[in-house]
Image (cartoon, rainbow, N blue to C red):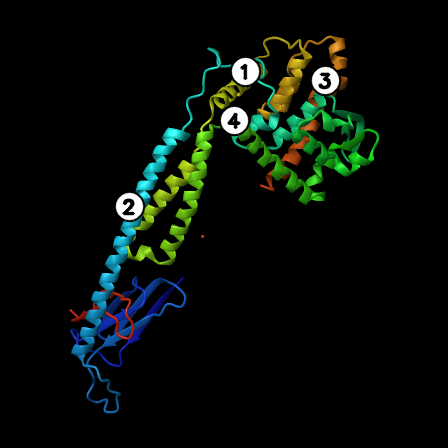
Amino acid sequence: MGSVNAKVILPYDAPDDQIWAFGHGPLNGRINIVSNNSVYFNATNLPSETFFEVRVLFPTNASFINAEKGSGTLTSILEEEKSFGEKTKRTSMAFTIGILVVLGFFLFRTIVWVVRFYKFGKDDPLPEVNLAGSLHEPPSELEPSLVETLLNGSPTGKSIVSTILELTRRKILSIEFVKGGKKSLFGSSDEYFLVLKNIGYRDVVAKREKELIDFLFSSYLIKETKEDLKISFEEIKGYAKKRPVETNSFWTRWISEAKKDLKDMGFYEKESLEMQGKGVLELVFWSIVNFLYFTSQGFIYFPAGMLILLVCDVALIVSVASMRKKSKWGGTEKSGWLAFKKWLKDYSVTKNYPIDSVILWEKYLVYGTVLGISVKALSQLPVKFSEAMQRNSAIYPVFYHSGGGVAGMGNFASSFSALSSSFASYGASGVGSSGGFSGGGGGGGGGGGGGAG
């Protein structure tokens, strides 16, 4: 596609009413006779290999005795141009009618899909959990990545941090530290390590948890070792740079599998998913029609069609993309997690009473992380555990070693926020008169002509 501009300058001034100009080729061409010896021609969006031809008629000059003479007369040429012009009008009218029929069909299908969305795809209001609208315990044992996908549509790095905390809670992993082990120009700080404690973890973890462990510790090293594997948080920070292909592959699977698993669990109504599949097929058909419309320059015959087509496209895409109605279980589950998130946010601010169950406290840490509660707020939750409870917890020592709970978890979160950020990066006739071109060649119809006025 390109624009073409042409200027024809006559060898002498012609009488105002004896200049005729015609253009052939693109139907969106324009002609402008601007003076007694100048004619401008213009065409936009001219496809490649499409001819662009102009013809200008004006009286001969008797003094040009050697001028070449053609066989056509003014009358015959004007009749020829008129016939081509009429043919062009008929062709243009046929195209316009065809486009209107297609656009009418698209409008009808758009209305059909909007109605289908309200019937099959629009979510019902979330059910009320209770009068307070909050829950002080997680509503289910759903995996952190699925919780985040359920609430936000896709998992982020928060779900990785949360999953590691969950694996630590179950003593498959552990978090160890060396006090003052990290040296720098500005002094020293605690160095943290993630340790694989249970080499036989494959029998006791979910598929997604296994993939995370394999990624963090390298499945090759896990197969070769007979003892605990240990990696520092600093090593984890560098994974995206040192292992970009593996990191990208892992992260892509992490996202796609979370979405797929949630769908397979029945989070969406089956009928709405089937309807969405049909909508995707129709979108493919629409994309072909859109392509043909623009390549055939349909907008020349009916310019308003571009706007109509755009509105239909947007309405269909939105309707099909949103055609995922939550099932009754899905609505109840989402409502429960939102209620738990509300309670956890409120509690992290008010801290009305200390938590006396280490099991419940660990769940708050696991799910609070994926629900977006700040690490600092989570580490400052008031607790009241017995010494036996403290010893039995795999997470508690990381928070409260030597009174450095906030700093401990702060370093932990900082390390994984860097990893999370690295994952996120893997996510233009006559003077003064005017007229149009015709599709004819060698003297095609249509154009401007007449007196100079």
Residue 65, image quadrant: bottom left
Side of 176 relative to 47 (left or right):
right
**Which of the two discs, 3 and 4, sits closer to the camera?**
4
Q: Give me the C-alpha separation between circle 3 and circle 1.
A: 22 Å
Marks 1 and 4 in Cβ contact (< 8 Å):
no
**Which of the two discs, 2 and 4, sits closer to the camera?**
4
As helix, strand or loop, the secondary structure at mark 1 comes to: helix
Q: Give me the C-alpha separation between circle 1 and circle 4.
A: 26 Å
As helix, strand or loop, the secondary structure at mark 2 comes to: helix
As helix, strand or loop, the secondary structure at mark 4 comes to: loop
Tell me the kind of residue under disc 3. Answer: Tyr
Side of 221 relative to 284 (left or right):
right
Which of 276/406 is in front? 276
Instruction: Name the residue tied to disc 4.
Output: 266
Q: Which mark is residue 343?
A: 1
Instruction: Name the residue tied to disc 2.
Output: 104
- Measured as percent of width and height from the top left, residue 53 is found at 31, 72
Earlier sequence position, callout 3 versus callout 1: 1
Instruction: Name the residue tied to disc 3.
Output: 396
Q: Give me the C-alpha separation between circle 2 and circle 4.
A: 37 Å
Tell me the kind of residue under disc 4. Answer: Gly
Earlier sequence position, callout 3 versus callout 4: 4
Q: Quadrant of the N terminus?
A: bottom left
Residue 452, image quadrant: bottom left
Residue 349, image quadrant: top right
**In the image, is residue 387 above or below residue 208?**
above
